[in-house]
Amino acid sequence: MCRQAVGNKKGYMTIDKEYGGLEHYLSWLVFERGGNGNGILFVKDKRIIKFKKDVGLSIEEIADDLRNTDYDYALFHTRLATVGSVCRSNVHHFVFSPDFALAMNGSENCSNLDKSEKRPDMTDAELIAKKMFESKEHPKKFLDKHTKGGAYTGIYNGKPYVYTHSKDIMMLLKKGDAFLFSSDFPWQYYGKNIYTFDFDNVLYWEEGMELPTNIKETFDAKELVNGPYKNDTIREAIKENPEYKKLISRILYQFDKEIDTQETIYALERKIKQEDIDRNISVKKLFKI
């Protein structure tokens, strides 16, 4: 599993100026599910104009590039190694031409491609990128045919795109003309033009399409802890409102990246055990906002 983002310059600058800053946002993605190599590429006039990736590529350097480069779109990826060793060649993105690149959040189980052609230590993402590039098929057609899980971002014919099988591994910042697709956002950003998706099969977007409308704004964490349930216990809050369960689950996952976000009660108990606090602690005290 990894973390990735696709957005226009206004989207990244909105994060920088109105949220926690680019270093905070990118560092958090690396902490959550990355750290084995970072990649950044920039697109201007349907051409990749700058591309960097390395195991040691710093968030500070990437943030400076996001501020100072003249671009239409930027794609970020941080790798958490699952298939393939930790080395520069396995860091995403996989760029095959000035108008084609791919990055992935997933594992070998996401693809039904014949893996007999994989060279030793080759990642599944690179194999998918290679086969897609050679096929010359549209990303949605190729990914519909050859993948069954995961999330993919890339460049095809100079256009950025987003493709995901799961609504739980992609979110959206949308404010005016600014937008940023991201695997997740720090929970402190929730409720501030940050949206989750609601779809049945797959989500696909590319440059030239309207941004998805099947979205739902996230709950503001401060609304949760300062609202009518602020003095309730966590269990009471979850029982009263299912949306709180989703938010609390995401927040707890971000406290400990090994927590399974679907196992909310177990996550709560684990958090409580780690902090050595009363299991009937109030919402407000737990999140300390």
Image (tube, rainbow, N blue to C red):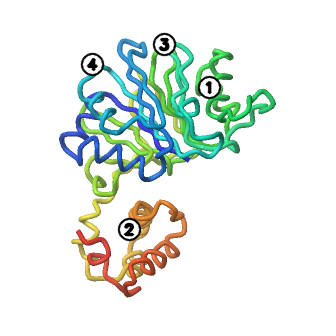
| Total numbered labels | 4
- The residue shown at (45%, 45%) is 183
Relative image position of residue 260 (x, y in whole percent): 54, 64
Task: Provide the secondary structure element on which disc 4 rests.
Answer: loop
The numbered disc on residue 70 is: 4
Q: Earlier in the sequence, mark 2 or mark 1?
A: 1
Counting other residues with Cα less than 10 Å from the Cα at mark 2, is it few (<14), some (14-19), or many (20 or more)?
A: some
Measured in 3D between alpha carbons, the distance from the residue under mark 3 to the one under mark 1, in whole angstroms, is 14 Å
Q: Is disc 2 in contact with disc 1, using a CB cutoff of under 8 Å? A: no
Q: Is residue 273 above or below residue 197?
A: below
Q: Is disc 3 in contact with disc 1, using a CB cutoff of under 8 Å? A: no
* Res 49 quadrant in image: top left
**Quadrant of the snapshot with the C terminus:** bottom left
Measured in 3D between alpha carbons, the distance from the residue under mark 2 to the one under mark 3, in whole angstroms, is 44 Å
Measured in 3D between alpha carbons, the distance from the residue under mark 4 to the one under mark 2, in whole angstroms, is 40 Å
Q: Is disc 4 in contact with disc 2, using a CB cutoff of under 8 Å? A: no
Task: Provide the secondary structure element on which disc 1 rests.
Answer: helix
The numbered disc on residue 129 is: 1
* Tag 2: amino acid: Tyr
- Residue annotated with mark 2: 244
Measured in 3D between alpha carbons, the distance from the residue under mark 4 to the one under mark 3, in whole angstroms, is 17 Å
- Discs 2/1, front: 1
Q: Is residue 5 above or below residue 230?
A: above
- Residue annotated with mark 3: 98
* Tag 3: amino acid: Pro
* Tag 1: amino acid: Ala
Query: Which residue is at the front of the view, 208 or 29?
Result: 29
Counting other residues with Cα less than 10 Å from the Cα at mark 1, is it few (<14), some (14-19), or many (20 or more)?
A: many
Measured in 3D between alpha carbons, the distance from the residue under mark 2 to the one under mark 1, in whole angstroms, is 38 Å
